[in-house]
Image: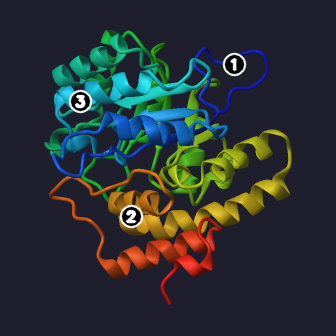
Amino acid sequence: MSPAGPEAPELDLAGVLLPVPTPFHPRTGDVDPTALRRNLARWLAHPVRGIVLAGSTGEAVFLDPEEHEALMDAARDVVPPNRLLLAGTGAESTRQTIRRTRAAAERGVDAVLVQPPAFYRGAMTPAVLREHYRAVADASPIPVLLYQVPPRFSTVELPTGLVAELAGHPNIVGVKDSRGDLEALGAMARAVPEGFQVLSGSGAGLLGALQVGACGGILGVANLLPGPAAGIVAAVQSGQLEEAGQLQERVGPLHRAVVAGMGVPGVKAALDFLGMVGGAPRPPLRALSEGDRDRVRTALAEAGLLSPEEVPQ
């Protein structure tokens, strides 16, 4: 639920956080910290709440442990203390998740986002997941957020009852829900204790999520429209629902066309068109075809980010 009154949590997640793509060097294919810092400077010029490294949009499953650490080191140099720096640390084993989480804490990360283990999907019962998350939270020096990964990925679903139960752990402070199901998100927000923070992972439904109890979002589309995405939360907080609706009408179509429609390769191509560093995804993901790149440019133009002259006819 959204924090209210004087009981605001120590880690206030209200607002929009960017799950940033990981730039790779075009010749070597290695993580490119210089490019990441350059992108961060552009994003942080907008009123976003913070940055999330090594999430789904950051191709976390393709990164080596030392690359996770290099990203965190590079970002900590740039992200100021008044913004949040989060990192994805979920792994298939509890042991490895704890190791990654502790490494993030050592590098000054404010909180971690932990996806559920899913390779042995049939064995991941609520009891197993409860034990896993409690062990991670007990061992973590920093706050933990649960991560309900988008259903189109290989994942398991965290039942609402399990999330509500885990929300009682003092070191589990929130959840990112990327299912895109507004009714399910609302049910989760009603089930968790006051002060437990629910974040939407869907740029198409941010306004609706805020209206049913979310306090903000971790949104792939905010990499492309950071100001308008953050503006939706600010407008709702100030009671300007008409303005929030207008911003949502701009953000939603770009989410559907690029983030939901083309995934990581689409977001990276869009960054290239916007003068930032996107680059190619890491194999086996493939860069977009020329036809899809044209569709990305069209979507950016329709969102007011490119002029019509920049879109092929």
Could you tell me which quadrant the N terminus lies in?
top right
CA gap, disc 1 to disc 3?
31 Å
Residue 218 visible in the shown view: yes
Q: Is residue 11 above or below residue 123?
A: above
At label 3, the amino acid type is Val
Q: Earlier in the sequence, mark 2 or mark 3?
A: 3
Measured as percent of width and height from the top left, residue 43 is found at 55, 41
Residue drawn 42% across and 59% down? 272
**Badge 3: residue crowd in 10 Å (few <14, some 14–19, many ≥20):** few
Work out whether residue 55 or residue 133 is closer to the camera in this orientation and state it.
55
Q: Is residue 192 above or below residue 219?
A: above
Task: From the viewer's perspective, tell me whether residue 121 is left or right of residue 301.
Answer: left
Residue drawn 43% across and 43% down? 20
The mark lying in front, picked from 1 and 3, is 1
Q: Which residue is mark 2?
A: 266
Q: Which residue is mark 1?
A: 8
Using the image, tell me which numbered label, if any, was put on residue 128. 3
Task: From the viewer's perspective, tell me whether residue 156 is left or right of residue 163.
Answer: left
- CB contact under 8 Å: marks 2 and 3: no
Measured as percent of width and height from the top left, residue 52 is found at 44, 35
Count of marks placed on residues = 3
The quadrant holding residue 2 is top right
Work out whether residue 293 or residue 162 is closer to the camera in this orientation and state it.
293
Q: Earlier in the sequence, mark 1 or mark 3?
A: 1
